[in-house]
Image: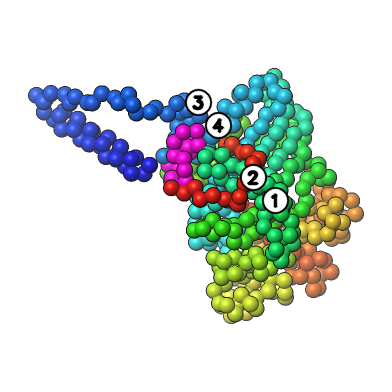
Amino acid sequence: MQASHGLAVMLFLALIALSLACSDNPSSPAPVLPALDASVEVDPLAQTWGEINLECPETTRPLTGRGAKRGPCCYRGEPNSVRVDAYGDGPESVIEYRANYLVQTNHPDSLSLMALVNTAIERSDHEEQSLLIRFVTARMDGAQASGPGSITLGQGRYNCDGTYSFYANDAAPTGGDFPGADDPSRWAPKVVPITVDASKQGRESATIAFADNYNGRAYTPFVHSGTYEYEWELVTQGFNIRNLGTDREDLDCQGRRNGGMWEPGVDTEAYVVLSDNHHKSNGIPLLQGQTFSQLLAFGPLVQQQDLQELDPLGERCMPERGDPASTCRWVKLPSALCPETEAERALFRCHIGWEQNPYGEESHCTMDPPETPRDDPEGDEGQCCDPLGGQRSGLPACNAFRMETAIVAAAADITDEGGPLTEDCRL
């Protein structure tokens, strides 16, 4: 595709040069252009599904047809805008997205370092990972209607034909030492009931009752970029979509590809619990086995001794950025409190518990633990926590980092077929 596109550009420039040369000599006859070859296939989907976008990463097949990358955000398959119109008067609409780009933005000494950002972009561009989202809402009189609906959220695979699949209930390998590692269904998507208010816009148009929301662990598998074999996985809690467009133009693209660069349109958050992500079996091979908790707490480590001795579950100290005399190895302290028992999950979700933290993270915590579920979106979120581990304050230790992620959400065709971890769909 890249070569043929370059050839087409060269031919186009040659024709321009020829026309300019002829225009300088009025006596020269007008060039005779060859007739169009009727055998050249015209894209029959361009008018309804959008033009194939040549700015999109040309990394995986197909490059033409139903599965080609189209529109400003490189969506594949039938766009949501076309699908929604076909639903007519209902009774429901189904809107599906894949995160074509997702990069963490609030960890400048670890995840937001350019080398790790580029690795994350390449992983998405090669479709090694796919965060998939499906919205189901009521429909009436040709439009979205107020009423019950659902969000299905989970990791999935690319099928090499322009479609994606959520992982099946038996897709995950077993045998690791992190929480949930013996559950083969841990990668399966979670379905959460929502209530839609069609009179509102954006994120406020859909609400989730505390009792209905999923408040457990979620798992993201990572594969080897060369062999596509399973390597490790990240364990998170408390995923939340912080902003989401609901206008007509948002149906297909929330964010875009512009000048060969991604421009995200959606912000999300999730929480990384230290004790869930500091185990040998979910160490990161690319970082010599460093765990994700070590990465967030201490930044990338290169010395084997540091990998063995620096413990994110051990004693903490206040980072002193810019002080060469400081002996504190922490580059960032956890600022959030997540539930770790079923009793706690019934009362609160992950939240920022470090008041007046230096990261600009807003907190709505209380000094005392909650006695009833934190079901009021305008009220407090749970108990405050001590970033230094609770040695002196009497508060529980902050046990998690918040991970903020910028996303390009692109229309997608999601099936429920499951299948193996992934296929190598690269060109």
| Element under disc 1 | loop
* Residue 74 seen in the figure: yes
Bin the neighbour count of mark 1 within 10 Å (Cα to Cα): few under 14, some 14-19, many 20 and up: some
Helix or strand or loop: what does disc 4 sit on?
loop
What distance separates the C-alpha of mark 4 from that of mark 3? 9 Å
Asked if 334 appears above or below 66 in the picture, the reply is below
Around disc 3, counting alpha carbons within 10 Å, would you say few (fewer than 14), some (14 to 19), or many (20 or more)? few
Point 85% across, 52% down: residue: 346
Do the numbered discs 2 and 1 sit on residues whose CB atoms are within 8 Å? yes
> Amino acid type of disc 3?
Thr
The three-letter code of the residue at mark 2 reads Gly
Q: Residue at x 75, y 42 (%)?
A: 192
Give the quarter of the figure containing the N terminus.
top left
Q: Earlier in the sequence, mark 3 or mark 2?
A: 3
**The one of 8 and 262 positioned closer to us in this rendering:** 8
Left or right: residue 408 compared with residue 297:
left
Of labels 4 and 3, earlier in sequence is: 3
Q: Position of residue 292 (x, y in %)?
A: 63, 64
Q: In this figure, which residue is indicated by the disc labeled 1?
A: 170
Separation of residues labelled 2 and 1 (CA atoms): 9 Å
Q: Secondary structure at mark 3?
A: helix
Badge nearest the viewer, 4 or 1: 1
**Can residue 293 be seen by looking at this rendering?**
no
Asked if marks 4 and 2 touch (Cβ < 8 Å), the reply is no
Distance of mark 3 from mark 2, alpha carbons? 29 Å
Instruction: Residue 48: give its label.
Output: 3
Residue for badge 2: 418
Residue 232 image point, x, y percent: 62, 61
**Amino acid identity at mark 4:** Glu
Q: Which residues are magenta?
A: 55-71
Q: Nearer the viewer, mark 1 or mark 3?
A: 1
